[in-house]
Each structure stands twice: as structure tokens, then as C-alpha cells.
Amino acid sequence: MENYQSTTEAAAEIRAAYKAKGWNSKQIGVRAQYFSLGSSIDITIKDGRIPVGEAKQIAEAKERIHRCEVTGDILGGGNRYVSIRVS
């Protein structure tokens, strides 16, 4: 059984990983949000010099989506989505 990690904790780990790469909050923003039956981590890349693929790979490691084993449908409740946009 995997250890539970809150969305806030996951977002903090993403921020730390970005900081280790030398990226700061003026270059890339990380926001944790909660909503009914789930949560999300929204990444905003503000600096065009940041490689989108690399930032995406770091963030998507924290995505957690529960799916039906038979149909593959996304199950309701407890999912954590990650989205990345370039502004």
C-alpha cells in the first residue's frame, strides 16, 4: 500500500524539484487546488527558456488517477490531476 501524500505536499515536492533545477517562482508557478472529490496541481511556465517537457515530466510524476481495471474509466473521488500551461 502506498503512503498517502496530500496535494499540498506533492506541490511542495514539485517546487523543490524545480528549485533544484535552478528555476524560481518568477519563472514557473505551482498551485495546489482542492475541489469536490479530487484535487489538482496547476503548473504555469512563465519563462520560455524552461524546457516544457522536463517540467512536465517532474510534475506528472505526482499525478494520481484511479481507473477501473476492466474498462479503464476514471473513477470518481480521490484523483489528483496535473496540468501544465505556458503563459
Image (spheres, rainbow, N blue to C red):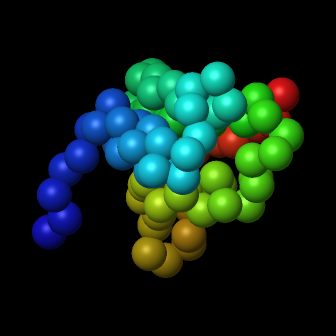
Residue 70 vs 19, above or below: the answer is below
Task: Give left or right: position of 1 versus 40.
Answer: left
Task: Give left or right: position of 2 versus 85.
Answer: left
Q: Is residue 23 shown to the viewer in this render?
A: yes
Q: Residue at x 68, y 31 (%)?
A: 27
Q: Residue at x 85, y 40 (%)?
A: 48
Q: Residue at x 76, y 29 (%)?
A: 46
Residue 9 vs 60, above or below: the answer is above
Q: Quadrant of the N terminus?
A: bottom left
Q: Nearer the viewer, residue 7 or 56?
A: 56
Residue 75 position, x and y percent, is 46, 52
Residue 27 vs 82, above or below: the answer is above
Q: Nearer the viewer, residue 23 or 87?
A: 23
When asked about the image quadrant of residue 66, the answer is bottom left
Residue 14 position, x and y percent, is 45, 45
Q: Is residue 75 shown to the viewer in this render?
A: no
Q: Quadrant of the C terminus?
A: top right
* Number of numbered discs on residues: 0
Q: Residue at x 55, y 45 (%)?
A: 22
Residue 8 vs 53, above or below: the answer is above
Residue 52 position, x and y percent, is 76, 53
The residue most toward the front is 22
The residue most toward the bottom is 70
